[in-house]
Image: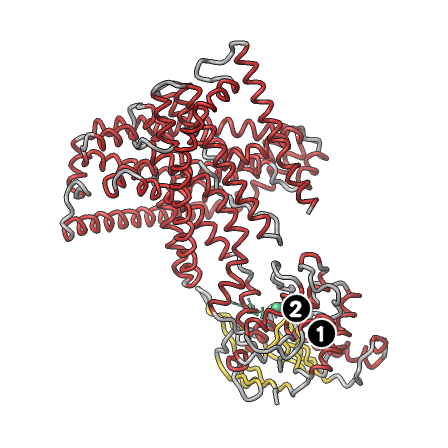
Amino acid sequence: MAATGGAEMSGTVSRPDARLLPGRQAEAERMLAALLRGLAFVALLLGALVLIWHALIVTLAVPAYVAPSPQAVWTTLTGEWPRLSQALWFTLRSTLGGMAIALVLALVLAGLFTLSDLLSRAFLPLIVILRTAPILAIAPLLILIFGRGQATSVAVVVMVSFFPMMVNAARGFRSPKANVLELMHVCGANWWQIFLKVRLPFALPYIFTGIRMAAAGAVLSAMLAEWLSGAPGLGTLILEASSFRRLPLMWAGVVLSMAAATTLFFLTVQLERRMTR
Amino acid sequence: MTEIILRNVAKRFLLPDREVSALEGIELTLPTGSFTALIGPSGCGKSTLLRLVADVLRPSEGEIRIGANAPSVARRKHEIGFVFQEASLLPWRNVLGNVCLPIEVARVPATRDPKALVHMVGLAGFEEARPAQLSGGMQQRVAIARALALDPKVLLMDEPFGALDEITRQRMNLELLRIWKSTGTTAVLVTHSISEAVFMADTVLVLSANPGRIAHRIEVDMPRPRRLEMMRQLAFNALENEVRAALFDDSGAVA
Amino acid sequence: MSGARQGLIGALVPPMLVLLAVGLGAELAKGLGLLPITVPAPSQVAAMLPTSFDDLMYHGARTVRSALTGYAVAASLALALASVALAIRALERPIVSMAVLVDCIPIIAIAPIFVIWIGQGPHLHVTVAAIAAFFPLLVGAVQGFRAIDRNMEELFHVIAASRWQRLCKLAVPSALPYLFAALKIAAPLALLGTLIAEWMGTDRGLGAMIVLSLFSFDVARTWLTILTVCGLSALAYGLIALIESRVVTWTGPADGGHGGR
Ligand SMILES: Nc1ncnc2c1ncn2[C@@H]1O[C@H](COP(=O)(O)OP(=O)(O)O)[C@@H](O)[C@H]1O
Ligand SMILES: [Mg+2]
């Protein structure tokens, strides 16, 4: 019975794919074209930004301590690349590692919540409330507890990423219509089969929405943690450069962290779009 | 004099990839104080026709007159009352507040007492109720009272009772006829129900789709005031059959 | 009315119970020596309160003032921009895209630049608070204006309502549930923004108090200050929720869909 149920579910999912197979190539080409167009747009935008920046500096005769020229920042970017890339790599490790741990935690917990209605009714409201709290405010406590290494940065990212991921995953796992679940139940599927074949596929768009929401704040969280703990990432680099008045270095760090944050965010947006379509 | 006149009216929608012709060659004269029913398959342009008359849309071709005026002028003179399929009440206002909305907006001294209007549509005692506390039929009555608040010369109704059950719908039909008689407005009713069209109207216009045209025109020569017993008369059934035949004639199905 | 009160109590009691349980558990664990030195017992934190109370009030007032000002600035700006997007529909997408872009720029990265431009001090705190709170407010306002029923728009057209009447009688009330959802989310963010700006280096405000006690390894005082911040944020959230329940009486709270950090 369970086998027929499973076959039916996967059948309905895979059949349209099979029919569309001749169109796969065309779709791949369309996606590539869209990607190229997106890249061209970003390049254009960046070019325009740099031009405007340059024009502003030149026309307003902005002194270097207010804002350096794009060339100065570029020179620093290339000249100090070893140092900058090391800091960037440190920050990215904390960011991605923290997000990965948060995702696993969120999925496991949200999955457990589908096991027991009581569990989810007791804890979900609390998690929803905590989600709106300024989690980053407790970063200093994590420094107190985890010390001044990378563990703190990771912990801060986990704390901040966990709540949007968890709330969305829980929502996603509960999103299948009751009659689909009843059908699986009638077919004799067990909890694990229902989870894998119904809840997880239905929840994927929600999960990716959670990842996207978390990504918006993840780099910020990692940098803030470094900032408070003094760990050698971009956050610390920017703060030190600003206190030693090494402004081109500071601006290079700012540009780099903005690029990292926007790239991460838009990657997750793309991922979400691909999954929700 | 507030006849509604449409001369050779056409409406086409420009979509990104093509042009959709919703209405073509509409020639109509709806006499002052008449009651007209529009019936036709889904997507044949009934709502579009009402929206053109109400100046929500502009015709692509042709001319529309409400009395001596263009729709835009009639609208600014508050001569048009409009009732939507869903009641479209403001959920944050109570019944009286919703009925008063057009009066507030127009900033004219009320020609009708809003309380009396609420009374007239049978909602006395519900003045303070919020829309969420009312049934669908009651909400639709509020919408009708609101449409009548400024004593409009023409009353346009787009499937106002489409979401109601049969019994409520018949009761609302009777009330609407009574209200219409007492106000003397020129009424246009879009409906999906053949019996409703015949029961209410002096003239039933059957529209055909793609593009929307007036395919048939059926005069209903039943006496007024109309009463529910009339629906069981042979003459009524004959008229229903005539409308049904006209509908199936060129669309094949009533959507 | 009593039903609403009962609902409020029903919503408040379970989290309170959980908090109480956590507190008691921590007390017990500390007593058994299971917690590290960096995690004090609740009683130790409470013991800090009398000596730190004046400090908390003094620094808290600073922080609250900056956060409130930034919050107000962000809300006004968001409403203004959303109104522009409402009036000129073509501008809606660019405005929202811009806001998304600004939102994914880490505040921490730009805060040092603002230090150079406007210097340390209250202005900086207000600016950073406003930036932190801005995005959910804008999204909420835009979403709210977008939620206007199409039939309603046509109705207001048919009754020949002016632009101003449409804004006051239709757009703003329609948007209110979304606006309140955004206002609730943005309040803790404004507080957090102020805190981040204060962490940049200042000697006043709760942020400064946290950093000072952190660097002097005053564990209980660090915890107390941070708990105060959390309490303030919960208070702000609750206050707005209370106003919301008085103002938006025709619908349940809308789901804002944007998390805090
Ligand atoms: N705003 C619009 N843009 C594009 N097409 C429209 C629009 N409004 C209506 N149409 C098209 O015009 C036709 C008539 O629509 P409508 O008047 O709503 O039909 P009815 O009310 O008879 O069901 C339909 O094909 C519909 O798709
Ligand atoms: Mg229609």
Asked whether, in this view, residue C225 is left or right of residue C180, the answer is left
Asked whether, in this view, residue C222 is left or right of residue A80, the answer is right
Residue C120: image location, x then y, percent: 27, 38
What quarter of the picture does the N terminus of chain B occupy? Answer: bottom right
Q: Mark 2 lies on which chain?
A: B
Q: What element carries label 1?
A: helix
Quarter of the image where ligand 1 sits: bottom right
Residue B100: image location, x then y, percent: 62, 70
Residue A172: image location, x then y, percent: 57, 38
Give A141 or A237, whichever is nearer the viewer. A141
Give the residue type that dot 1 points to.
Answer: Ala
Residue topped by disc 2: B143
Above or below — where is A220 with respect to C171?
above
Instruction: Work out whether mark 1 precedes mark 2 in sequence or the reverse, and give the earlier one.
Output: 1
Dot 1 crowding, Cα within 10 Å, few <14, some 14–19, many 20+: few
One can see residue B209 in this view: no
CA–CA distance in space, label 1 to label 2: 15 Å
Q: Do labels 1 and 2 share a chain?
A: yes
Please report the residue visible at 64 percent of the width from the left and 77 percent of the height from the top.
B155
Give A261 or C249, whichever is nearer the viewer. C249
Give A201 or C153, whichever is nearer the viewer. C153
Asked whether, in this view, residue C28 is left or right of residue C192, the answer is right
Residue topped by disc 1: B116
Q: From this viewpoint, which residue is outermost toward the top?
A: C32
Q: Within the image, what quadrant is residue A123 found in?
A: top right
Give A219 or B193, whichever is nearer the viewer. A219
Give the residue type that dot 2 points to.
Answer: Ala
What quarter of the picture does the C terminus of chain B occupy? Answer: bottom right
Dot 2 crowding, Cα within 10 Å, few <14, some 14–19, many 20+: many
Q: Is mark 2 on a helix, strand or loop?
A: helix
